[in-house]
């Protein structure tokens, strides 16, 4: 029998009706704490239920637990308490520093630069700093950003100049105060780029409805030639 690791919605994983294995409340708390702390757990062992199965629920896409009844119950509790996001198993770092300074410091050990700066022409982003405040542990005062102005290009060139060693750049821009041609031109100063244009007409950071409706979002991908 082969085993494959798959992701299954919690409500599609069914107990075996004859399961009699019970874990003490104390042990269950211990397992739950461990999952909360590490985000890791041994995968449940399940079998797919087919119309030929004894306890087929009448619909495809359901699985019966062979091992992991207690873990399923623990997951249900964890989701109920709002813990439905699990750690990725890495020691992540969050910094509240200027992007150019961070890039300079980390470029040599980074695989992807994902840049989602305030867009030129969209000053609403200057009050959009929820994550900044969460990371700082206090309400960070809002401030005008050069990224939001027509002078953003120098910032972008400076930052990308510091990101030469990063194999892949993923850059997000909106069309209000720039054009795809302009961004591609700036990126092309360093490396060839491709773009995807997305209709994105409901950007709350844009005050006027007609401007928001005309808005397009650009996702630019640029792989360094030596990493291609
Ligand atoms: C469009 S938002 C990106 C938000 C984020 N990707 C998200 O989805 O929550 C732009 C972010 O860039 C931050 N920012 C502005 N200037 C910056 C700089 N020089 N260095 C680093 N971050 C900056 C802003 O505070 C804001 O949080």
Image: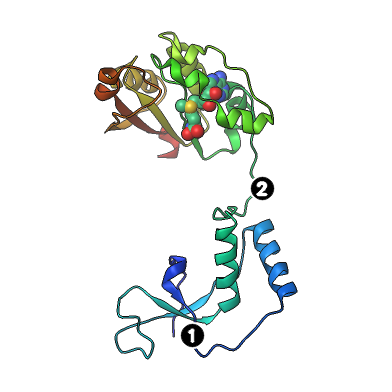
> Which SS class for mark 1?
loop
Q: Earlier in the sequence, mark 2 or mark 1?
A: 1
Quarter of the view holding residue 109: top right
Q: Residue furthest front?
A: 80
In-front residue for pair 200/172: 200
| 92 relative position to 66: left or right | right
Colouring scheme applied when the structure was drawn? rainbow
Label 1: few (<14), some or many (≥20) within 10 Å? some
What is the CA distance from the residue labelled 2 to the residue labelled 1? Answer: 37 Å
Where does the C terminus fall, quadrant-wise?
top left
Q: Position of residue 114 (x, y in %)?
A: 47, 34
Residue sitting at 51 percent across and 16 percent down?
158
The residue that disc 1 covers is 16
| 184 relative position to 125: left or right | left
Between marks 2 and 1 in the image, the one whose residue lies nearer the viewer:
1
Q: Position of residue 217 (x, y in %)?
A: 32, 28
Label 2: few (<14), some or many (≥20) within 10 Å? few
* Residue 221 sits above or below residue 214 on the image: below
Quarter of the view holding residue 180: top left
Where does the N terminus fall, quadrant-wise?
bottom left
The residue that disc 2 covers is 91
* Residue 76 sits above or below residue 108 on the image: below
Residue sitting at 67 percent across and 29 percent down?
136
* Residue 147 sits above or below residue 94 on the image: above
| 115 relative position to 139: left or right | left
Residue sitting at 28 percent across and 18 percent down?
211
In-front residue for pair 80/29: 80
Q: Is residue 10 visible?
A: yes
């Amino acid at each position: 029998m082969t085993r494959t690791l798959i992701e299954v919605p919690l409500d599609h994983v069914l107990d075996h009706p004859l399961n009699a294995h019970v874990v003490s409340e104390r042990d269950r708390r211990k397992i739950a704490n461990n999952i909360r702390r590490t985000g890791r757990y041994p995968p449940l062992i399940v079998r797919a239920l087919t119309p030929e199965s004894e306890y087929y629920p009448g619909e495809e896409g359901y699985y019966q637990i062979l091992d992991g009844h207690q873990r399923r119950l623990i997951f249900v509790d964890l989701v109920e308490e709002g813990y439905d996001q699990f750690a990725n198993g890495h020691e992540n770092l969050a910094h509240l520093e200027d992007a150019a300074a961070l890039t300079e410091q980390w470029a040599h050990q980074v695989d992807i630069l994902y840049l989602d700066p305030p867009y030129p022409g969209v000053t609403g982003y200057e009050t959009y700093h929820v994550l900044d405040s969460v990371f700082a542990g206090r309400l960070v005062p809002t401030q005008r950003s050069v990224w939001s102005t027509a002078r953003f290009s120098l910032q972008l060139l400076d930052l990308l100049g510091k990101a030469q060693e990063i194999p892949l750049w993923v850059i997000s821009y909106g069309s209000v105060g720039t054009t795809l041609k302009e961004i591609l031109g700036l990126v092309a100063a360093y490396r060839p780029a491709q773009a995807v244009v997305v209709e994105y007409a409901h950007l709350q950071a844009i005050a006027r409805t007609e401007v928001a409706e005309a808005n397009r979002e650009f996702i630019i991908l640029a792989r360094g030639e030596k990493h291609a």
